[in-house]
Amino acid sequence: MCLSAGPISQSSSSSSSSSSSSSSARCSSCYDPACCLRRRIMAAELFPTKKLLPSIQQYQQQNRTNNNTAAAQGCCNWQGLYPTIRERNSVMFNNEMMADVHFVVGPPGGTQRVPGHKYVLAVGSSVFHAMFYGELAEDQEEIRIPDVEPPSFLAMLKYIYCDEIDLCADTVLATLYAAKKYIVPHLARACVNFLETSLSAKNACVLLSQSCLFEEPDLTQRCWEVIDAQAELALRSEGFCDIDTQTLESILRRETLNAKEMVVFEAALNWAEAECQRQDLSPTIENRRLVLGKAIYLIRIPTMVLEDFANGAAQSGVLTLNETNDIFLWYTAAKKPDLLFCTKPRKGLAPQRCHRFQSCAYRSNQWRYRGRCDSIQFAVDKRVFIAGFGLYGSSCGSAEYNAKIELKRQGVPMAQRIIKYFSDGSSNTFPVFFDYPVQIEPDTFYTASVVLDGNELSYFGQEGMTEVQCGKVTFQFQCSSDSTNGTGVQGGQIPELIFYA
């Protein structure tokens, strides 16, 4: 996803920032209508649950409504119909009445003429104040703003005139750009909050790129948290292929990526193919290597499992013959060759465990399974990523279990897996993991469930706690109606939640 502007220039506070000089802060692709369409399509995919922002046509309808409101009153005191200054200002939004400036907004071929009122705009933005009333103010009746899209500009004006924030996925990044350019900090903060709320593995890489562009360190940190914990999902997302080279290198350099190196390698090749298309190059093996440049050495190929390297990277054609031979020698030879690739495995993330029982026990007549469901509900006060559960095993010696683990939110399954695990007869817990860590939002109850099949008699937890502090995260537990085998807050199964934070 490319944004219709480049880095924000601090000089935007001068009057020239709204016209021709603003072109220095945008990329040439901003004028490509196809680029804008691709961005909107991708935004709809990245934020599928969000409502659509009012279209230009809807803003135009509001323009007609506002104009008709005043016109219908004729010479009457229409102002008396609205008791507050906010309501009276709202009538002026996108309204030709008393407009003393006009903006031609958008790239060539996609412009819209927007009416404005200098006083209202100057009160809402220091940039507009400098533009209309500053020492370098120019008396222009029409101002061209080619680097901001019309819906985003109108969303900003709606905030300035009406004190209303109207955001949605397909234009929130462009609205953030407009709010930054014209120094409307509260709208910018609302855009960042919207992005943080919508953050997922699908869009984390794209938002990482944009958060760096907009110098939003909190959003950048949130993006890294998602990318680290759900690295394989993030690397396989369509959004990963749309990031810039600098963001690609920062991700490939990341020490805490929780991903197999083969997944990192495949993601880099997918990005290279997309980059070839952006540069109008044929996506041949040679051109993929060309656009990757030195970034390929950030992939820790020597840390792959030998089988992955032999069947994947070694046969991809991206590596030179000498590189392939040297890496094979690195795996097998006593005297290892010097490599340009990093040979140290990534640290990844260390999983944390939330243990909800203070003790465990077993008796000859319980705990039994027989295909029934053990379930518990939990909530957290900070975003975490549930990787799996810690489960008890047999109390009658070593045994193997088949486990169906599941995680639900408001009755809707988010992840499930059928897996086998072996217990050694001790009272320890044994980890079982989902295919990918699951993002858990704060202040919402989720349901953790397991159906076990194996030795009927097992250990079970006692003296359960309703609240558990794990590092900086607080877990709360409550009984689940899905539990048909006796597990609850005070005792039972699912003693541990394994998570990343």
Image (spheres, rainbow, N blue to C red):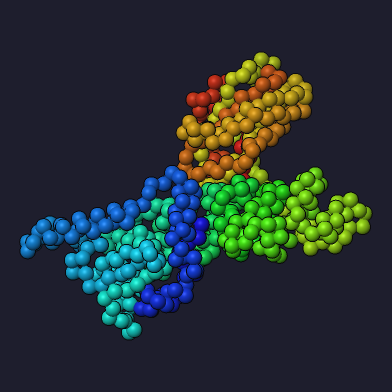
Question: Residue 463's image quarter?
Answer: top right
Residue 355 in percent (x, y) is at 62, 37
* In the rendered image, the vertical position of residue 90 relative to residue 481, given as above or below: below
Residue plotted at (14% across, 60% down): 70
Question: Residue lying farthest top?
Answer: 365
On the rendered structure, is 123 left or right of 215?
left
Question: Residue lying farthest right?
Answer: 334
Question: Residue lying farthest left?
Answer: 76
> In this orientation, which residue lies closer to the viewer: 479 or 246?
246
On the rendered structure, is 178 left or right of 384?
left
* In the rendered image, the vertical position of residue 384 relative to residue 66, given as above or below: above
Residue plotted at (22% across, 73% down): 100
> In this orientation, which residue lies closer to the viewer: 14 or 473?
14
Question: Residue 432's image quarter?
Answer: top right
Residue 47 can be seen in this image:
no
Question: Residue lying farthest bottom?
Answer: 135
Residue 283 in percent (x, y) is at 65, 57
Residue 408 can be seen in this image:
yes
Residue plotted at (21% across, 69% down): 99
Question: Residue 420's image quarter?
Answer: top right
Residue 244 in percent (x, y) is at 58, 62
Residue 455 in percent (x, y) is at 71, 19
> In this orientation, which residue lies closer to the viewer: 358 or 321?
321
